């Protein structure tokens, strides 16, 4: 029965995954569809022109967690933006992720880097 | 109505094109075989009997083996009947596969839910129970009062009480079809379906119904049939 479930999951999973571990600094490139609405001819009844644009939006930070297995696997990236911690959870096999680029290998002794949330002691 | 017998494989998730996660149940649906045709003349109603799965001949009962031997098949695990208007479409030993659902957006799934045993009133109906302290004595998970006084002098029917829960036949309607694998006979359905992994399911669709089904439903209710365009 489990084998059958894998026949569903396998073809939907990402084939090439750049290896990365907890503690690595990564740059996740996300494909984002931007919908731009333009109004033309305001006199003669507004005709909307809707254009879709694909944009690539990077999210750079430290991987603090990898969780789950198979198609359900997710990872959490933490970055600090203007002094405020921002975390995003990504499904590893999500089609909106175009690339995961490892910038720096980390050297950590934990599986989950929750201690980063506590911040620097001043 | 057209349907199939299947088995629940388990749940997983898939991604939509926009990257949204869709929770799906994987069902091994079919292939089923038409084991018997029931006719109005002989049985009082028109239906086809579908068979699914395999059973060792040593494990099957003799009446079961005989039933399948009549049409030259090996004994099957599950049998289910579907009422059908036009019997001439089907022959015995015909194979029915998942492709019957390839045009349908929604399916209904019937199965037997997981048995929960005897459940108390708090778990079964979400009652609040009795207070934890302030003099409550051994009645922390009780329902409290279940009625009034000499008038009416009885407990009303349908009063929510503890009892055996689950292990009953449930139909989940209008589950959207998330994907079909015709080669491997796999049906993906959005959301959950009753039963544990490996339990038998009956999947059917109202939407592939022949056009004259409405009239048959009215006939069944003994209402006058009027054909309108």
Image (cartoon, rainbow, N blue to C red):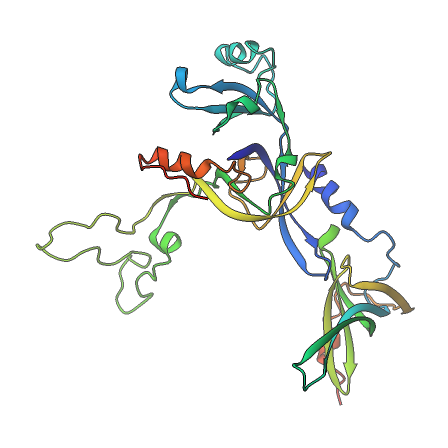
Q: Is residue A115 above or below residue B154?
A: below
Q: Is residue A53 left or right of residue B70?
A: right
Q: Is residue A8 above or below residue A72?
A: above
* Front-most of residues B131 and A27: A27
Q: Is residue A80 left or right of residue B197?
A: right
Image spot of residue A72 (x, y percent): 71, 54
Image spot of residue A99 (x, y percent): 86, 64
* Front-most of residues B167 and B136: B167
Residue at 70% from the left image edge and 77% from the top image edge: A48
Residue B58 in sight in this render: yes
Residue B167 in sight in this render: no
Image spot of residue A105 (x, y percent): 90, 67
Image spot of residue B4 (x, y percent): 57, 32
Q: Is residue B225 left or right of residue B156?
A: right
Residue at 74% from the left image edge and 40% from the top image edge: A7
In which image quadrant can residue B170 be found? top left
Q: Is residue B104 above or below residue B35?
A: below
* Front-most of residues A46 and B193: A46
Q: Is residue B63 above or below residue B31?
A: above
- Count of marks placed on residues: 0
Residue at 26% from the left image edge and 60% from the top image edge: B137
Residue at 32% from the left image edge and 37% from the top image edge: B224
* Front-most of residues B199 and A111: B199
Residue furthest to the bottom: A122
């Amino acid at each position: 029965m489990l084998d059958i479930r894998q026949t569903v999951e396998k073809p939907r999973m990402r084939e090439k995954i750049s290896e990365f571990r907890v503690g690595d600094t990564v740059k996740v490139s996300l494909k984002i569809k931007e919908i731009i609405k333009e109004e033309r001819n305001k006199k003669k009844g507004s005709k909307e022109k809707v254009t879709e644009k694909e944009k690539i939006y990077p999210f750079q930070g430290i991987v603090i967690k990898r969780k789950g297995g198979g198609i359900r696997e997710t990872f959490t990236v933490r970055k600090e933006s203007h002094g405020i911690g921002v975390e995003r959870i990504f499904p590893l096999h999500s089609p909106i992720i175009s690339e995961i680029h490892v910038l720096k290998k980390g050297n950590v002794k934990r599986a989950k880097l929750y201690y980063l949330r506590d911040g620097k002691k001043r | 109505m057209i349907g199939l017998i299947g088995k629940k494989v388990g749940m997983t998730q898939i991604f939509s094109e926009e990257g949204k996660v869709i929770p799906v149940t994987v069902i091994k649906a079919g292939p089923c075989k038409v084991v018997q045709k029931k006719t109005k003349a002989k049985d009082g109603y028109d239906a086809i009997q579908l068979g699914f799965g395999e059973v060792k001949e040593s494990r099957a009962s003799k009446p079961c083996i005989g039933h399948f031997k009549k049409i030259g098949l090996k004994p099957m695990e599950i049998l289910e009947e579907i009422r059908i208007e036009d019997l001439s479409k089907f022959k015995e030993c015909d194979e029915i596969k998942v492709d019957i659902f390839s045009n349908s957006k929604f399916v209904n799934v019937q199965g037997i839910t997981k048995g929960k045993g005897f459940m108390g009133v708090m778990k079964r109906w979400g009652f609040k129970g009795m207070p934890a302290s302030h003099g409550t004595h051994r009645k922390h998970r009780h329902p409290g009062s279940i009625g009034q006084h000499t008038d009416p002098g009885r407990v009303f029917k349908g009063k929510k009480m503890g009892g055996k829960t689950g292990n009953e036949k449930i139909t989940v309607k209008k589950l959207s079809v998330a994907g079909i694998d015709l080669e491997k006979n796999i049906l993906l359905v959005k959301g959950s379906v009753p039963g544990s992994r490996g339990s038998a399911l009956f999947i059917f669709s109202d939407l592939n119904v022949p056009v004259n089904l409405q009239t048959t439903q009215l006939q069944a209710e003994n209402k006058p049939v009027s054909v309108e365009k």
